[in-house]
Image: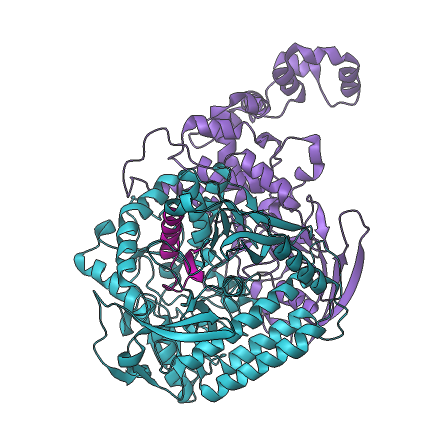
Chain colours: A purple, B cyan
């Protein structure tokens, strides 16, 4: 998600969310050091999965346009040759050098260094050693979603009829380099086994083919049923950290949710109920929402209902009378527009 | 069947073996489809008559491959078979599997115009990423077993000398793995990261050449090192990021190169439209600038798109991203560029009909072979040929029994490297030293004296630095330092063979510049420079190339005056 600013001369610049608040444009971040200036780098180190971690400090001399990976390479060559960190391509293609710098997920080969850096491994994955995480949990989820095409009709011939307009979302997802920055940043993944949410990165991997018009409906439905996608809280953390600039929520997760609601409606029970309540009443009526999702089973929790009633969280009378707010008309209009999912 | 390498050639070999009912196992030092050079494929050249190519386009593509890409050091019969296969099988098969060849909104496939046309997977500049991601998923779907982040450290041989196994190190756990197979396919790639500036990825260290040589494989044209001319000069990690000089999708323009005086000295679409991948043409243009004092091989010249508007460049390419990430004003500002060692044209000598090496049981596919220079389509074709070659030989290939002595020797060697009590340099420093020797003395320009001096330095490294190598950690888990120690031994061996081969070729040709032998000599050196292992060392032999379709039109000429 980005914010577009228009300057006095009419030129526009787009900022990703988070960047504007920090006032750290790419231009400023690449121009603030002098050659040889010492950067303070603190690296989290651990010898294996079970051992505790320590932090080790290094002074790293800046060199032109230095990336975080250059700083790690300097450390390995000059100060701690046993530092474990993973990278292959060094140019934002393989997606294996992701880590956390000062608390946010970055791709080490792509991100400019900062004057003071705390470097840590990605979250939500086991640490093998130092900055190296075990990719296996992520890889297992991706494989489980079967992220490939199963055509409903036979492949015609090369080149097959296909427009970019129909591939727009899939094409964005195809920019994914599987770096797992979003997987580390996702608060729902951070809940561990409490949900069955596949996580943003596996969903983007799935989106590459599930949002491809050539894929068969049955195949897409089968894959979507494995995703727990409605656990996504649309917090946009994934989109904020994505080094490939993929609009993960707006161009991948939301279209996938819409597909899931159409192809696997039982997954979307809560989301569809919420929408119906808002469309009918012009606001979220928690009582109505619970009744629609749980039915009369909700009444079995009578003490809880009473507690919520006393605290003003639910208003049973209003729920039963079906009271509308003045926004009901507008809500209905917005939610039944053609482009709404 | 053991397949070493998880790039375009290795993956396609494994997929084809699987289709033929032969069980492959992929051993990949990095991650299948995520490490190595295949990811770097910017776009995909249209070969033959595909996608509305004219007869002229088809001929141009073939001529480009043979002249500009390989300087005639290629089996032209193989090139023809490959071209036909690409046209007939490659594109349809990729599209059927789901690869998205970029369309416009109306559904036309977007191509680059010009004498040779190309297409892109999703975005130009990034085609290798979805391409290899598709391969990774095809491998997963086919349930083909993979040993990832696992380095092959030695080829294991039967008592008759034939290859039938691989000794491996799982770099994450530090465990040794012995793979026994009916045969081994080496597919370790083109780019070996032996120079101070190299496009080779983190894990590249000429392992394929070193392992093949130790097993007795004949090598060929090792001196034919290919260079990128406009890769970004700073920061160091971006040394592999190229300002692509090729034609752009949906535009008539290409990047331009400018010397330190601000004068343009190369622009592919204007200067040499037949040089689709104009790397050698660029290098020669740069050499003239270097001699005129207007550029250096390690910087002092610039590349970019300041003659284009941003949308023209960025609608179908990734080319603006690096500029923007550096905070540069794209496309108005240019970026400083430098030369980077790219692919090695040479490698292990193969029979191009079957991909057999000179050692029974050892097959080769893709860039580590010495039969052609890179392009992801060519590497892929090798994957098909090697699978067919292995299938035909299958009745004669028995499963290897455990060669206990060889296994014990390799275990001892790796243990010793890990447990070393040396007090010298750490392995990564020795790597850097070696890369500097190669850059300074066996780099873009070299002569007999600099090459001999390089041999002396390599010998010092081998005899003095390697035995005293120091490791800060002797752990097994994710010990990249230990891996560096294993790598550097391979690098020293490969560098020596490369420098020897460079001394042997008594001419200049394409990207191979000898200051002391500036002429391209088609009378004596239109030949393979074959390096054979002997009982007490090695010997060189020349093997002429057949020239059935394209021939050079001169006998001898100053290499810098030759277009290709």
Please indicate, yes or no, whether residue B227 appears anywhere in the rendered image: no
Seen as rendered, the residue at the extreme front is B160
- Does the segment drawn in magenta span residue A1? no
Residue B315 percent across, percent down from the top left = 38, 55
The magenta span reads B362-390
Relative to B278, B492 lies left or right = right
Q: Is residue A68 above or below residue B298?
A: above
Relative to A44, B547 lies left or right = left
All told, the count of numbered labels is 0
Looking at the magenta stretch, what is its main secondary structure?
Answer: helix
Please indicate, yes or no, whether residue A119 appears anywhere in the rendered image: yes
Residue B83 percent across, percent down from the top left = 28, 55
Of A145 and B109, the residue lying toward us: A145
Of B214 and B396, the residue lying toward us: B396
Seen as rendered, the residue at the extreme left is B55
Of B437 and B259, the residue lying toward us: B437
Q: Using the rendered view, name the quadrant where residue B124 is placed.
A: bottom left
- Does the segment drawn in magenta span residue B383? yes
Q: Residue at x 56, y 47 (%)?
A: B401
Relative to B199, B519 lies left or right = left
Q: Residue at x 41, y 44 (%)?
A: B394
Residue B307 percent across, percent down from the top left = 35, 70
Of A33 and B203, the residue lying toward us: B203
Residue A85 percent across, percent down from the top left = 66, 58
Q: Is residue B264 above or below residue A93?
A: below
């Amino acid at each position: 998600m980005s914010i577009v600013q228009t300057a006095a001369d009419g030129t526009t610049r787009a900022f990703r969310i988070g960047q504007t608040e920090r006032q750290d444009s790419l231009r400023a971040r690449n121009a603030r050091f002098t050659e040889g200036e010492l950067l303070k780098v603190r690296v989290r180190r651990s010898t294996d999965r079970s051992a505790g971690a320590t932090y080790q400090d290094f002074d790293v001399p800046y060199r032109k346009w230095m990336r975080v990976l250059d700083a790690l390479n300097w450390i390995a060559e000059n100060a701690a040759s046993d530092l474990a960190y993973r990278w292959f391509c060094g140019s934002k293609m393989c997606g294996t050098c992701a880590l956390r710098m000062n608390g946010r997920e970055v791709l080490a080969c792509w991100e400019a260094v900062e004057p003071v850096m705390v470097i840590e491994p990605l979250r939500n994955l086991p640490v093998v050693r130092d900055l190296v995480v075990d990719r296996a949990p992520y890889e297992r989820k991706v494989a489980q979603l079967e992220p490939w095409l199963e055509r409903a009709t036979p492949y015609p011939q090369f080149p097959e009829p296909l427009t970019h307009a129909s591939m727009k979302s899939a094409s964005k997802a195809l920019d994914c380099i599987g770096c797992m920055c979003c997987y580390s940043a996702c608060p729902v993944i951070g809940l561990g086994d409490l949900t069955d949410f596949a996580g943003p990165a596996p969903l983007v991997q799935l989106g590459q083919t599930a949002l491809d018009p050539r894929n068969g409906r049955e195949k897409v439905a089968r894959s979507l049923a494995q995703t727990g996608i409605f656990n996504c809280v649309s917090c946009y953390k994934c989109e904020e950290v994505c080094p490939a600039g993929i609009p993960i929520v707006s161009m991948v997760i939301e279209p996938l949710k819409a597909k899931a609601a159409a192809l696997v409606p039982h997954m979307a029970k809560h989301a569809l109920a919420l929408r119906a309540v808002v469309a009918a009443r012009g606001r979220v009526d928690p009582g109505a929402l619970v009744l629609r999702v749980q039915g009369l089973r909700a009444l079995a929790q009578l003490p809880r209902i009473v507690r919520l009633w006393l605290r003003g969280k639910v208003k049973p009378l209003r729920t039963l009378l079906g009271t509308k707010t003045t926004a009901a008309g507008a809500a209905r209009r917005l939610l039944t527009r053609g482009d709404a999912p | 069947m053991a397949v070493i390498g998880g790039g375009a050639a290795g993956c396609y070999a494994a997929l084809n073996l699987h289709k033929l009912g032969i069980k492959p196992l992929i051993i990949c030092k990095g991650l299948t489809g995520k490490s190595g050079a295949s990811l770097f494929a910017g776009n995909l050249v249209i070969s033959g008559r595909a996608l509305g190519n004219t007869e002229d386009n088809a001929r141009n593509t073939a001529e480009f491959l043979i002249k500009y890409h390989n300087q005639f050091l290629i089996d032209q019969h193989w090139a023809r078979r490959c071209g036909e296969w690409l046209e007939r099988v490659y594109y349809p098969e990729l599209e059927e599997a789901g690869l998205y060849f970029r369309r416009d909104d109306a559904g036309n496939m977007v191509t680059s115009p010009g004498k040779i046309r190309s297409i892109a997977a999703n975005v130009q500049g990034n085609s290798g990423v979805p391409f290899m991601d598709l391969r990774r998923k095809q491998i997963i779907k086919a349930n083909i077993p993979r040993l990832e982040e696992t380095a092959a450290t030695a080829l294991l041989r039967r008592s008759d000398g034939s290859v039938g196994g691989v000794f491996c190190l799982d770099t994450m756990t530090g465990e040794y793995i012995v793979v026994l197979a009916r045969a081994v396919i080496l597919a370790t790639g083109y780019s070996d990261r032996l120079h101070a500036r190299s496009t080779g990825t983190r894990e590249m260290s000429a392992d394929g050449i070193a392992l093949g040589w130790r097993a007795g494989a004949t090598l060929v044209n090792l001196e034919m090192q290919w260079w990128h001319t406009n890769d970004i000069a700073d920061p160091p990690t971006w040394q592999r990021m190229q300002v692509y000089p090729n034609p752009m999708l949906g535009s008539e323009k290409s990047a331009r190169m400018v010397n330190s005086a601000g004068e343009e000295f190369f622009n592919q679409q204007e200067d040499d439209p037949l040089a689709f991948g104009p790397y050698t043409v660029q290098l020669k243009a740069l050499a003239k600038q270097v001699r005129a004092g207007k550029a250096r091989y390690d910087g002092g010249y610039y590349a970019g798109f300041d003659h284009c508007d941003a949308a023209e460049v960025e609608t179908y390419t990734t080319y603006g991203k690096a500029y923007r990430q550096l905070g540069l004003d794209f496309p108005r500002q240019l970026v400083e560029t430098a030369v980077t060692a790219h692919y090695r044209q040479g490698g292990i000598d193969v029979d191009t009909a079957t991909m057999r090496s000179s050692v029974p049981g050892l097959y080769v596919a893709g860039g580590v072979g010495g039969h052609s220079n890179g392009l992801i389509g060519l590497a892929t074709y090798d994957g098909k040929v090697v699978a067919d070659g292995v299938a035909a030989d299958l009745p004669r290939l028995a499963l290897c029994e455990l060669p206990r002595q060889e296994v014990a020797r390799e275990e001892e060697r790796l243990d010793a490297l890990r447990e070393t009590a040396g007090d010298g340099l750490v392995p990564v420093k020795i790597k850097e030293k070696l890369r500097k020797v190669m850059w300074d003395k066996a780099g873009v320009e070299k002569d007999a004296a600099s090459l001999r001096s390089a041999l002396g330095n390599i010998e010092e490294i081998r005899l003095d630095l390697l035995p005293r190598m120091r490791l800060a950690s002797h752990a097994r888990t994710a010990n990249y330092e230990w891996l560096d120690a294993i790598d550097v031994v391979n690098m020293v061996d490969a560098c020596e063979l490369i420098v020897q081969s460079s001394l042997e070729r008594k001419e200049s040709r394409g990207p191979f510049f000898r200051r002391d032998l500036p002429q391209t000599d088609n009378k004596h050196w239109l030949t393979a420079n074959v390096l054979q292992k002997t009982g007490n060392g090695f010997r060189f032999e020349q093997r002429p190339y057949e020239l059935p379709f394209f021939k050079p039109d001169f006998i001898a000429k100053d290499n810098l005056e030759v277009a290709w």
